[in-house]
Image (cartoon, rainbow, N blue to C red):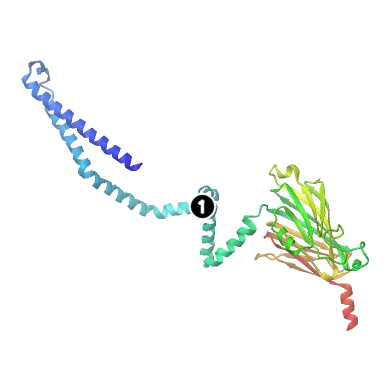
Amino acid sequence: MNQLLDQLYKAKLRLAGLVTAVVGVGFLFLSKAVATTATLSWLVGWPTNELGTTLLSAGVIAVIFEYYARREADERATAHFRQAIRQEAPAIRDAVLDSFAFEPETMRSIASEKMLDRIATNAIGLRLGDVELAHDAYADLREQVVRSPERWHNVDVSVSLSPWEGGPAKGKDSMFVATIRWEYEVRPTESTLRFVSTSDQAEYRELLRDPTVADQWMFEKVGTLDASSQDTFELVQFTIDGEERPIRRTVRRGAQVYTVALGKAATIGNEVTVSYTYRILAQCHGHLLYLDLPRPTKGLHVQLNYGQADIRYVNVLDYFASPEASRVERSPTTAPAKTVDVGFDGWVFPRAGVAFVWVLEDELTRHLIKR
């Protein structure tokens, strides 16, 4: 395209030079005719000869310039342009980088996802001084956060432990009932959420990567109890902005699934408050209750109430990959209620969580008697 325009420009310049020279020649002939023709004597005072000479010279010079001087003029203009670019390159570079740094949408409009990944990896590599570490760190971050469908905010979890009073006599005294209530703010991306209880370890690992699963529970078979029993897992309530949603339960061998349709909340795209409560069975002598966070979470508060359980002491383990420390507060020993509160204001990545590890009263009593 540029070559075609250049050829057109050359042709127009040559034509203009030719026309100017022809007009100049015409004026010279007219000047000769004025001296010999009586009817043209009124033009004797006109400078036709000088005008013809000027136009003829201009036309010839234009053609000569096109053939001989234009290439040198183009080379000189190109050299001046390159010199100007080299002089202004730092300012242009800084302006582009500032635009990318302070206006991310500008970068989004001109870069593909692969290019954005490369830019992010290179930037992290420069900061860390280790390209391989930057590549692996960003790959993990992308899998956990960038590709996560939702972000949870202001997550509040309350857990209440109490002795299990139902079921077969075998195992009755070895189980705690954990009533767990979740509440958080989210912009839903799925129209349906599932809550799954399973006794299959492989299936449990697959559920951890399923974006439609809001919570999953692994329950190993104990006696006649397995994950398909409502005693081991039951979703008892689900609300969105305070409005209860119907719950559908399906059972299969070794597992059960609770399904909730979100309704309008999944289509309007606004942030809503999701709240749900479920009950699970936890083995007393397992000494562990782990709460997993399946989505990137900003702001977390977890409270464990174990006043009704035969527990002497509870240790708290958090798995937050952050330089900030979580806050752990315990109720006074003189208070009737026994609680442990865990708070964290920063971001918590998926697959992180909080683990409560306890010591039972009867275990401590047996240990003291043996001594």
Image vertical order of residue 207 relative to residue 52, above or below: below
Q: Quadrant of the C terminus?
A: bottom right
Residue 330 on image: x %, y %: 80, 66
| Residue at (26% x, 38% y) in the render | 10
| Residue at (70% x, 47% y) in the render | 271
Q: Secondary structure at mark 1?
A: helix
* In the displayed structure image, the side of residue 17 where residue 269 appears, left or right: right
Type of amino acid under label 1:
Phe
Res. 253 image quadrant = bottom right
Residue 175 on image: x %, y %: 87, 66
Q: Nearer the viewer, residue 22 or 73?
A: 22
- Find the residue positioned furthest to the left: 36
* In the displayed structure image, the side of residue 5 where residue 15 appears, left or right: left
- Find the residue positioned furthest to the bottom: 371
Give the residue pinned by disc 1.
Answer: 100
How packed mark 1 is, by other alpha carbons closer than 10 Å (few <14, some 14-19, many 20 or more), is some
Res. 299 image quadrant = bottom right
Image vertical order of residue 355 relative to residue 155, above or below: below
Residue 111 on image: x %, y %: 51, 51
* In the displayed structure image, the side of residue 62 where residue 216 appears, left or right: right
| Residue at (34% x, 42% y) in the render | 2
**Total labels drawn:** 1
Q: Nearer the viewer, residue 226 or 130?
A: 226
